[in-house]
Amino acid sequence: EDQVTQSPEALRLQEGESSSLNCSYTVSGLRGLFWYRQDPGKGPEFLFTLYSAGEEKEKERLKATLTKKESFLHITAPKPEDSATYLCAALPTGGGNKLTFGTGTQLKVEL
Amino acid sequence: DAGVIQSPRHEVTEMGQEVTLRCKLISGHNSLFWYRQTMMRGLELLIYFNNNVPIDDSGMPEDRFSAKMPNASFSTLKIQPSEPRDSAVYFCASSLGGSNQPQHFGDGTRLSIL
């Protein structure tokens, strides 16, 4: 069964304190690995797609990386506005059209 | 540009009533996804349409759930009869070109069945 596990479940950082979120996946081949940000009361907002091991993508203070078993979302010098729940999702090659989502990492960045 | 628009934002109704959730896709997108989000199970895909045709409905929990796309820009998700365990946040998302393209989500309908 396809599975996506995110850690930690919750993370509290001071402003400027860099860290990484982990997304481990077990799927029958990977077509794509997606990262989303979700704010309270809102729908997930697309951040990145990674398609192959070794690929990296950056956007402002965020960088996503991908290996054959996991993905990391690195947050450099975070600000309070980076506080949100970060979701990753895997699209397997043999799973039709179904994204398997992790349960998310709830990030809070404090002044 | 307008994003995915869902209505209503909140719905509270009694067990046994029919519930209809609505979704307007982003203009030009041809794929539509309905999801359900709960604390216990996270985000789960219910059904996926491509070019107005249902492609994968394996996530639809029971016959009480049905979804339609009467045209290329609009979809409905109906629950009849509703049960308390259906309480969740329901999202729709659209994309240009299927599951391997970024999905853009609406802000959801928070459904409470009493």
Image: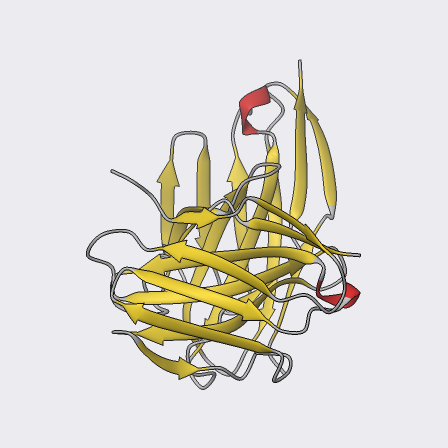
Q: Position of residue B5 (x, y in %)?
A: 39, 47
Q: Residue at x 66, y 46 (%)?
A: A105
Q: Position of residue B98 (x, y in %)?
A: 31, 70
**Which residue is farthest top?**
A111
Q: Residue at x 54, y 40 (%)?
A: A42
Q: Quadrant of residue A53?
A: bottom left
Q: On the picture, is A33 further left or further right than A10?
A: left
Q: Quadrant of the C terminus of chain A?
A: top right
Q: Quadrant of residue A5?
A: bottom right
Q: Is residue B3 above or below residue A92?
A: above
Nearer to the camera, B20 or A38: B20
Residue A23 seen by the camera: yes
Q: Position of residue B19 (x, y in %)?
A: 59, 63
Residue B98 seen by the camera: no
Nearer to the camera, B11 or A38: B11
Q: On the picture, is A70 further left or further right than B41?
A: left
Q: Is residue B29 above or below residue A30?
A: above
Q: Quadrant of residue A54?
A: bottom left
Q: Residue at x 34, y 43 (%)?
A: B3
Q: Is residue A35 above or below residue A98?
A: above
Q: Position of residue A23 (x, y in %)?
A: 60, 57
Snapshot colouring: secondary structure
Q: Residue at x 48, y 52 (%)?
A: A35
Count every numbered label the image shows and give the total: 0
Q: Quadrant of the N terminus of chain A?
A: bottom right
